[in-house]
Structure formats: structure tokens, C-alpha cells
């Protein structure tokens, strides 16, 4: 009798919610950007006169092919794991030889790309704009929701990378004063535009205050990216800082961090595949 007085269950009551999921478009963009940037990195030694052995040439051609597969999302998981293993081998060889860079990569580049590629391999970044979706649905524009955990891990890796860069700028002797920075731009570290700026009539105070501001902004980046109110402002700042570093120092590979910034703009959503009581 008492059961007859109970309120009947709402037909829209969700009794089981699936795991947190997110649209894959930002991850797919990050995957494509990784492929394009790696392609540019590995094509550069073939055109800038870098002296490579026959084995290094073969390795480089294999990595270029893998970068193409990564860009289009073909055999995605195998390709990303294979690239991470190649970077690990290059890192081991550089550490054994006691050098920071070779004709193909550098210690800093390998240390960043190894965790990024390993997390990306299991992120489902090929669930949009990819050859995988073409094989599955007949169109690369189809997409599927993916688990949000790999995206969160990639965001943590990016934030830690900016924290490392900030600590590097804070303690590395080259970045201790504006005069040292100006001398470095004139020397081997600067590009033609960087050297031209250093030789111009710009007062020393410009370099000193630019250094202070750059250090402060880079140290704020890994924390500001998590704050919704100021996130977009610091994403723009991050883009400008990377472009400035590329123009003045010719260091373009860290631009991969910029490609990952849209990951911070994607909000998690609950998967629509929840079980409903009828």
C-alpha cells in the first residue's frame, strides 16, 4: 500500500553516468600540428647542409614518413609509439656521447616529445580529421568522443614545460642581464633579425625590461592557463612569446606548446551515452 503512494520514477532519471568524455577536435588539431612540426624539424637537416651519415639519413627519412602518417592519423597508435621509441634512442645516444644536440634533435626536444607522444598515442586523437575515421565511416570529418584523461595529462605536461622554461630563464646565466642577452643576439644564438635588433640604437634599458617582463610572463603561464578568467589573455601572450623567440633566436620547435594551448579551452562534457530508466 505504501508503495502505491510513492512517486513514480522520472523517465529521464539517469541511473548510470559514463566516464567523463570530451570532443576530439582539439586533440586532432594537436595531433596534426605535432605531425607538421615534426615534419618541418626533420626536413630541415636535408636542406640546411647538415652533415649526416648514411644511417642518420635513413633514420631521418623514416621519421619523416612517420610524421606524415601522424599528420593524417594513419596507423596512429603504432606510429606515435614508434616515434617515441626513436626519440628515446636519440636521447640515450646523446646522453652517452655527452652532447646536447645532434644533426636531428636535441635533449630538450626529445625530453618534451617522448611524454607527449606516449600520452597522445592513447588519447584518441585520431578520432577526428583522420584516415582512421575515413576507414571507419567513409569520411575524415566524422568524429567520436574520447576519454578526457589523456587530454588532462597533456595539459599537465604543457604546464610543466612552461614551468621548466621559466626556471631556465630565471637561473641560466645568459638570461641574467639585458647586456648578456644583447651580446647573445649578436653572436651565434641570434638570427639575422635578432642581430640587427641588438646592433640598433635601442637603449640597454629596453633589453633589461624586456627580460624582466618575459621572465614574469613565462613563470605565470603554467598557472594562468588553468584560470578561466585570464586563460585567453595568457594564451595570446604565449603565442607572441613563441613567435618572438623564433624570430630572434631561430628556435621554432617549442611552437608545439602553442599547438597544445587550445586543449585548455575545451570543457569536459558528460557522454550522451548514459543509461536511462524507462
Image: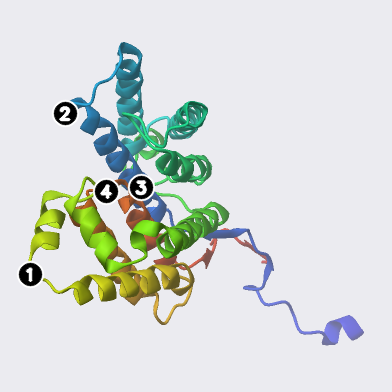
Q: What residue is rendered at 30% in x and 12% in y?
A: 54
Q: Earlier in the sequence, mark 1 or mark 3?
A: 3
User: Left or right: 253 with respect to 226?
Assistant: left
Q: Nearer the viewer, mark 2 or mark 3?
A: 2
Query: Circle 4 — which element?
Result: loop
Query: How far apart are the two marked residues, 3 and 4, measured between alpha carbons?
Result: 32 Å
In the foreground, 214 or 173: 173
Q: Are marks 4 and 2 in contact (CB under 8 Å)?
A: no
Question: From mark 2 to mark 3, how far is it between C-alphas?
Answer: 37 Å
Residue 175 lies, in percent from the top left, at 35, 62
Instruction: Mark 3 or mark 4: name the one nearer the start of the chain.
Output: 3
Q: CA distance from mark 1 to mark 3?
A: 55 Å
Relative placement, left or right, of 36 versus 16 is left
Q: Image point 37% across, 65% down: which residue?
A: 176
Distance (Cα) linking label 4 and label 1: 27 Å
The residue indicated by pointer 3 is: 142
- Can residue 139 be seen? no
The C terminus: image quadrant: bottom right
Circle nearer the viewer, 4 or 1:
1
* Location of mark 2 (residue): 47
Q: What is the crowding at mark 3: few (fewer than 14 residues within 10 Å), some, or many (at least 20)? A: some
Can you tell which of label 1 and label 2 is closer to the viewer? 1
Q: CA separation, marks 4 and 2?
A: 16 Å
Residue at image mark 4: 252
Q: State the residue in front, 35 or 212.
A: 212
Callouts 4 and 1 close, C-beta under 8 Å: no
Please say if the residues under marks 1 and 3 sit with CB atoms less than 8 Å apart: no
Give the residue at mark 1: 201
Depth order, front residue of 121/157: 157
Q: Nearer the viewer, residue 263 or 191?
A: 191
Q: Residue at position x 51%, y 59% from top? A: 160
Amino acid at each position: 500500500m505504501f508503495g502505491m503512494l510513492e512517486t513514480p520514477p522520472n523517465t529521464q532519471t539517469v541511473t548510470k553516468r559514463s566516464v567523463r568524455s570530451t570532443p576530439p577536435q582539439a586533440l586532432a588539431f594537436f595531433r596534426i600540428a605535432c605531425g607538421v612540426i615534426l615534419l618541418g624539424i626533420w626536413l630541415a637537416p636535408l636542406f640546411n647542409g647538415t652533415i649526416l651519415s648514411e644511417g642518420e639519413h635513413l633514420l631521418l627519412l623514416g621519421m619523416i614518413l612517420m610524421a606524415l602518417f601522424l599528420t593524417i592519423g594513419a596507423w596512429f597508435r603504432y606510429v606515435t609509439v614508434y616515434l617515441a621509441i626513436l626519440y628515446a634512442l636519440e636521447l640515450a645516444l646523446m646522453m652517452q656521447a655527452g652532447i646536447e644536440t645532434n644533426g636531428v634533435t636535441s635533449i630538450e626536444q626529445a625530453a618534451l616529445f617522448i611524454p607527449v607522444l606516449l600520452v597522445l598515442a592513447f588519447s584518441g586523437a585520431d578520432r577526428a580529421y583522420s584516415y582512421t575515421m575515413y576507414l571507419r565511416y567513409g569520411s575524415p570529418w566524422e568524429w567520436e568522443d574520447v576519454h578526457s584523461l589523456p587530454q588532462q595529462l597533456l595539459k599537465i605536461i604543457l604546464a610543466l614545460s612552461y614551468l621548466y622554461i621559466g626556471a631556465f630563464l630565471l637561473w641560466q646565466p645568459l638570461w641574467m642581464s639585458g647586456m648578456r642577452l644583447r651580446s647573445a643576439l649578436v653572436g651565434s644564438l641570434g638570427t639575422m633579425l635578432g642581430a640587427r635588433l641588438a646592433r640598433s640604437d635601442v637603449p640597454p634599458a629596453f633589453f633589461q625590461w624586456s627580460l624582466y617582463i618575459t621572465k614574469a610572463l613565462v613563470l605565470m603561464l603554467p598557472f594562468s592557463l588553468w584560470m578561466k578568467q585570464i586563460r585567453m589573455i595568457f594564451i595570446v601572450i604565449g603565442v607572441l612569446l613563441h613567435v618572438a623567440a623564433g624570430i630572434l633566436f631561430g628556435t621554432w620547435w617549442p611552437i608545439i606548446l602553442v599547438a597544445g594551448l587550445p586543449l585548455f579551452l575545451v570543457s569536459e562534457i558528460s557522454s550522451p551515452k548514459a543509461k536511462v530508466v524507462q
